[in-house]
Image: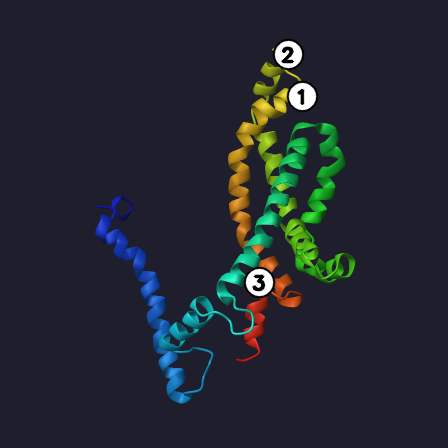
Amino acid sequence: MRLINRRPDRTAGLLLAILPFALVLLAYVLGSAERLAENPADKLLPSLATLGDAIVRVAFTADARTGDYILWADTLASLERLASALALSTLIALVVGLLIGLLPGVRALLASFVGMVSMVPPLALLPILFIVLGLGETSKIALIVIGVTPFLIRDLAMRVQELPREQIIKAETLGATTWQIALRIVLPQILPRLIDGVRLSLGPAFLFLIAAEAIAADSGLGYRIFLVRRYL
């Protein structure tokens, strides 16, 4: 039987799914043991027991100064920023992408500008955002919006232009207005693409958030990572 036709059963599939994680864990344990044998005070690859103690300390033990559970408090702070930025990015991308894809005049006005903005590295704008918007939440959310929105706009605009032209013509023949065409024909067909785009943007958005929190924040995962880094 050809390999392309071989399908693992449920047990084999589960074992194959676990195998990469087990290999990574084994490599970590071996590397940690080797480094600790050379230097028992090494903190780059701590033992699993040390990792367990650290997890208990930050996740299940209240901080003596603030009374918060550090891991959950920082995670909540980061997720609030991420959710706010993605919600704003999604709304802007939906409106602008729909207009660019559907209206030739708006496409001529904004398509080139959005394309140029999408090529600017967002992290290069971080110092400017801190100067203009300050060190508060606005600059962090703005960084994510600038980094994510242009790509969502271009993706949605392309999806609108990919729709069969016959659908638009038939709707116009039946007397549909531009507003009705946008809401009843185009919008339902681009929503799945928008959801996929937002899902794929989670990684870059989180990267931008960590970078912003590491530089100017008093809570969040990025802030905590760079704070703990000082003690390594």
Residue 220: give its label: 3
Residue nearer the viewer, 88 or 109 = 88
Mark closer to the chain start, 3 or 2: 2
Residue 149 seen anywhere in this rendered image of the structure: yes
Residue at 54% in and 51% down? 202
Separation (CA) of disc 1 from disc 2: 10 Å
Q: CA distance from mark 3 to mark 2?
A: 53 Å
Are there few (<14), some (14-19), or many (20+) residues within 10 Å of tag 3?
many
Q: How would you rate the neighbour count of disc 1 (Cα within 10 Å): few for under 14, some for 14-19, many for 20 or more? A: few
How far across and how far down the image is residue 135, in percent? 71, 62
Q: Secondary structure at mark 2?
A: loop
Residue 66, percent from left and from top:
56, 69
Q: Are marks 3 and 2 in contact (CB under 8 Å)?
A: no
Determine contact: label 1, label 2, CB under 8 Å: no
Q: Residue at x 34, y 61 (%)?
A: 20
Residue 195 x, y percent position in the rendering: 52, 40
- Amino acid type at circle 2 is Gly
Work out whether 69 lies above or below 163.
below
In the image shown, does 31 or 131 lie closer to the viewer? 131
Q: Are marks 1 and 3 in contact (CB under 8 Å)?
A: no
* Apparent side of residue 45 relative to residue 201 in the rendered image (left or right): left
Rendered view: 13 above or below 61: above
Mark 1–mark 3 Cα distance, whole angstroms, equals: 44 Å
* In front: label 1 or label 3: 3
Which residue is label 1 attached to? 178
Q: Which amino acid lies under the numbered mark 1 shown in the image of this protein? A: Thr
Q: Height in image: 155 above or below 162?
A: below
Q: Earlier in the sequence, mark 1 or mark 3?
A: 1
Q: Which mark is residue 175?
A: 2
Q: Position of residue 177 (x, y in %)?
A: 66, 17
